Amino acid sequence: MRTDSSPGTLPAREHLPAVTAGTPVLDVVIPVHNEEKDLRPCVLRLYEHLGRTFPYPFRITVADNASTDSTPQVAGLLADRIPEVRSVRLEQKGRGRALRAVWSASEAPVLAYMDVDLSTDLNALLPLVAPLISGHSDLAIGSRLSRSSRVVRGAKREFISRSYNLILRGSLQARFSDAQCGFKAIRRDVARVLLPLVEDTGWFFDTELLVLAERAGLRIHEVPVDWVDDPDSTVHIVRTATDDLKGVLRVGKALATGSLPLDRLTRPFGDDPRDRELPGVPRGLARQLLGFCVVGGLSTLLYLLLYTGFRAFTGSQLANALALLLSAVANTAANRRLTFGVRGRGGAVRHQAQGLVVFGIGLALTSGSLAALNAAGGDPAHSTELAVLIAANLAATVLRFLLFRAWVFPDRPYSTDDHQGETR
């Protein structure tokens, strides 16, 4: 089990890290732009709520980004009147830019933000940050799309929100449910490693942060929230949606090309149970054989289903070739990751090319078996075809394992000492 941490990685999660006297445990950032009317009642309401319910020292930071009305003056008066409130002025617009600036400079171990309209019920704030304080999670988000959430908003915004999250799931394989709810929190140590990787400075900022965190294997806690839409919101929906889609394309391209250095964040904690060696768990060759058998069994099932489906529309040889090709691609990818412990995208194309060579050998074995069967039996029953193909696939499977181990993924014994995220 790892107990050390290298530069650029995160230490093991701790319960609330020690802070010096006068340092807040929680820093809640409110990004604002021309919010002179809503800012004062929002801050006073949040201050009263935190003072009544939050058991640790806290701070409220108003992050004014390039307001042209009296917002800076309102924020300054609040900071002068309330010790737990401070005001930060930025000369450029952008919610992401404001959050990056304040979070990067804050000494609080837990950082949060919320929209100035306080659309989210503040009773969800303590459940939001509690998993971060305890060390259970790395980030936390409020979700308006949870089944237990209670949300009041128009059909247009509801449709846009759900469509956007479906796009994230389909294009970036995101598993979190609500990317754009203005109610999120992050541990400071996590923020300091993630923030340099986030490029966006506007509304896509927190979506990008979440996608990178999820891809890096960090733990994201979701809290169902009660949320009431602000009918006076100044957010330009069309422009924001366009910028978000551009961000999705940019991040998707970066993830596909492997240009983001997520390796250093993957499984960063020394207390990850996947890093523990348990008695009775097979290692080395035994571990590879077990993984290969599981993947092989699933691949054979996939192959038979595909063959049966293709066989209804074409001849046995073409159905066999198509089914074997598709199942071979899936088999190589699964064995690469699960059996031989290769992570990241490095060498993936080469491995698939080598896997196709192995596929060619399997195709020769199974096609030859089918040819021999047809030559001997004329028009064999479908069940007989399947039996012969199963036998041929078993032979091809043994050969595939030997070729994978000796040629495609040489010198890859499973080891918890492998540098996380790298391929050798």
Image: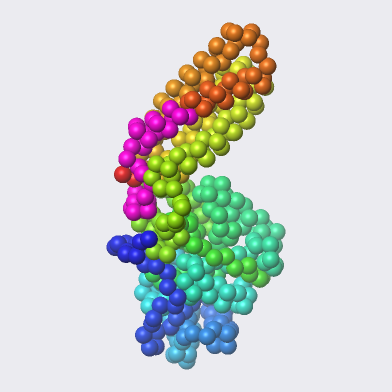
Q: Residue at x 35, y 61 (%)?
A: 2
- Quarter of the figure that contains the N terminus: bottom left
Q: Nearer the viewer, residue 387 or 175?
A: 387
Q: Measured along the vertical axis of the image, is residue 369 above or below residue 174?
A: above
Percent x, y for residue 256?
Answer: 43, 44
Residue occupying the point 51% across, 54% down: 244
- Horizontal arrangement in the rendering, residue 155 relative to residue 374 (left or right): right
Give the image's coloring scheme. rainbow
Any magenta on residue 151? no
Farthest residue to the bottom: give it.
Answer: 81
Is residue 289 rendered to the left or right of residue 308?
A: left
In this rendered view, identify the residue nearer to me: 296 or 237: 296
Residue sitting at x 58%, y 33%: 302
Q: How many marks?
A: 0
Question: Which residue of the protein is positioned furthest toward the left in this rendering?
Answer: 7
In the image, residue 41 lies at what x, y percent? 58, 83
Instruction: Locate residue 152: give its quadrant.
Output: bottom right
Can residue 240 be seen here?
yes
The quadrant of the image that shows the C terminus is top left
The residue lying toward the viewer, choosing from 188 and 196, is 188
Q: Nearer the viewer, residue 388 or 145?
A: 388
Quadrant in the rendering for residue 106: bottom left
The part of the image, by quadrant, that contains residue 403 is: top left
Q: Is residue 342 visible?
A: no
State the image coordinates of residue 79 (x, y, percent, origin top left): 45, 87
Residue at horizontal 60%, vertical 17%?
A: 316
Query: Does 330 appear above or below 217?
Result: above
Q: Which residues are magenta?
A: 397-422
Residue, far front: 280
In reply to whether residue 405 is colored magenta, the answer given is yes
Residue 296 placement (x, y as % from top left)? 51, 35
Task: Say above or below: 207 vs 67.
Answer: above
